[in-house]
Image (tube, rainbow, N blue to C red):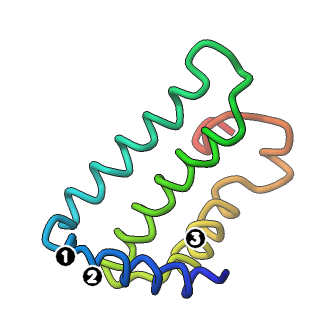
Amino acid sequence: MSHRAVIQSLREFVLEREWGQFHSVVNLAKSISIESGELLECFQWSDEAEQLRVQSELADVLTYAYLLADRLGLDPDAIVAEKLEESRSKYPVEKARGRSLKYDEL
């Protein structure tokens, strides 16, 4: 399913339940953070995690990210591509390959 189809399905899901009233920008941003914490919790005591639980929590993170992008009128593909280009310039291959330093430390 393309991201456009996913967003349309999410819109329909939210509309059917009249949940849009709860989806302010700040509430969606909070929800991303909360769900990210639940994703991280999968790895709390071990680097190994149950695949289905990770998948479920990651789906929650992505769902709220898509809903936030939609609420802000942003195209997820476009903003990721734009950020990737920005990161390419901050982290040139010849300086960043195999290193985890922040761009201002390269």
Measuring from the top left, give residue 64's x and y in whole percent. Answer: 40, 61
Task: Assess whether mark 1 and mark 2 are in contact (beta carbons under 8 angstroms).
Answer: yes
- Mark 3 or 2, closer to the camera: 2
Measuring from the top left, give residue 100's x and y in whole percent. Answer: 71, 34
Dot 1: element: loop
Is 24 on the left or on the right of 90, as rendered?
Answer: left
10 Å crowding of disc 3: few (<14), some (14-19), many (20+): few
Question: Which of the two residues, 73 or 22, is positioned nearer the viewer here?
Answer: 22
Q: Is the Cβ of the residue at disc 3 closer than 8 Å to that at disc 1? A: no
The amino acid type, in three-letter code, at marker 2 is: Leu
Q: Please name whichever residue, 103 or 12, is drawn nearer the observer in this view of the structure.
A: 12
How far is mark 3 from mark 1, CA to CA? 29 Å
Instruction: Choose top left, top right, bottom left or bottom right for residue 89.
Output: bottom right
Where residue 63 sits: x, y (%)? Answer: 46, 63
Q: Residue at x 27, y 49 (%)?
A: 30
Look at the numbered disc 2 and give the secondary structure of its residue.
helix
Give the label on residue 15, or none. 2
- Amino acid type, callout 3: Val
Q: Amino acid at mark 1?
A: Glu
Residue under label 1, please give it: 18
Q: Residue furthest front?
A: 16
Residue 28 placement, left or right of 84: left
* Eye-nearest disc, 3 or 1: 1
In the rendered image, which residue does mark 3 sit on?
80
